Image (tube, rainbow, N blue to C red):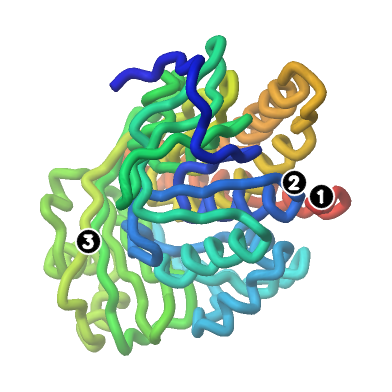
Amino acid sequence: MHSHDHPTGPADETFDVIVVGARVAGAATAMLLARAGLRTLVIDQSARGADTLSTHALMRGGVLQLSRWGLLDEIVARGTPAVRRTTFVYADERVDIGIKPTHGVDALYAPRRTVIDPLLVRAAEQAGADVRHQTAVRDLVRHDGRVVGVCATTPHGRVRFGGRLVIGADGIRSTIARLTGARLRRTGAHAAAATYGYWSDLDTDGYEWVFRPNACSGVIPTNDGQACVFASAQPARIGRGGVDVIRAIVAAGSPELASRLAAATPPAGTRTWPGQPGYFRQAHGPGWALVGDAGYFKDPIGAHGLTDALRDAELLARAVIDGFDLSDDGSSLTEALEHFEATRDHLSVPLFETVDRIAGNEWDDAEIPGLLRRLSSSMADEVETLAALDAVRVP
């Protein structure tokens, strides 16, 4: 079905904002909009609390967001281990970096998606958002060329929701991006594949990142005493993934980590990501906006997807709140959304380009230290930008 004008017939229900997607980016955006008093609907086609492909790691910017929103204590209470050290292994070096307390953040965390996703959904509901799972968008409703709602399918049949703004937070294969025809602004040249699983009883005390040409791997401590161990390389080397592939790539990059892995309890199964070049999509248009992977995606080797989602939820929510003036013709909102897109790109492009280079696995031991320094510098700039937002608190 193609999006088209529906000039007649009322919506079944009407809201200020409809957020499509109740994962991290969507639930966080909805929470902030609802806290500001906007009537917000969140719909998601999956069941509540379902797991999703993810390696969980939050960088400092993401932890800063959860702390600012009053949600970090609950992440900790759910048994998410505090990460106070990050280890980098590359070339002939091993570099240990302690997490220095800044901006109220004294540790990093990597919650399972079965922890953080429902927590954000609950926070959105507590703020007043209406959240409905197992509800899939089939079409957009337009009037005079502007998106004014969605047609959706629920377990009880078809329904039409009206909204002044529709936000697509529905991931890489975003239905909203497809239906709006959101243009690709920039694309990456490379895509690494990855495979991961959860080891128990692994001797580790923080994030571990191993960078070897075509043999990257890492350890991310998460809930229930488990550690997410991943391997990332060119798709041909990852193949269909699995425990043996992870072990082989870890051994190629860090024999010391391989010996610890051999002493731990391996997972019964693994998940594999086949690879996808990164991209920036146009972030907004008449009556619509994109957030999270729907709008911007980069290779998971940067371990920055969740942090990006939380950052852009804040930036988009602020733009919508600033521009949501019912008395004007939509120009205030358009201007605010243009500012959101410019800020998103300013913060993201340096990180995107560096991660894209790493994902290609065409660098050598001489180049990787400089790439990692660039990553670190980009992340520091992002944290400073987010920390400066404290002065303009979202209601």
Q: Secondary structure at mark 1?
A: helix
Residue bearing mark 1: 388
Q: In the rendering, at what x and y percent does residue 97 appear? A: 58, 69
Q: Nearer the viewer, residue 107 or 211?
A: 107
Residue bearing mark 3: 271
Would residue 348 be seen by someone viewing this image from the given angle?
yes
Instruction: Residue 390: name its quadrant.
Output: bottom right
Question: How far apart are the alpha carbons under marks 2 and 3?
Answer: 34 Å
Would residue 357 be seen by someone viewing this image from the given angle?
no
Q: Is residue 152 left or right of residue 317?
A: left
Q: Is residue 360 left or right of residue 93?
A: left
Q: Is residue 171 left or right of residue 35?
A: left
What residue do we see at 73% from left, 28% from top?
336
Q: In the rendering, at what x and y percent does residue 356 appear? A: 41, 37
Question: How far apart are the alpha carbons under marks 1 and 2?
Answer: 5 Å
Q: In the rendering, at what x and y percent does residue 57 appear? A: 47, 63
Q: Secondary structure at mark 3?
A: strand
**Which numbered circle lies on residue 104?**
none
Residue bearing mark 2: 385
Dot 1 and dot 2 residues touching (CB under 8 Å): yes
Q: Secondary structure at mark 2?
A: helix
Residue kind at label 1, given as amino acid type: Ala
Callout count: 3
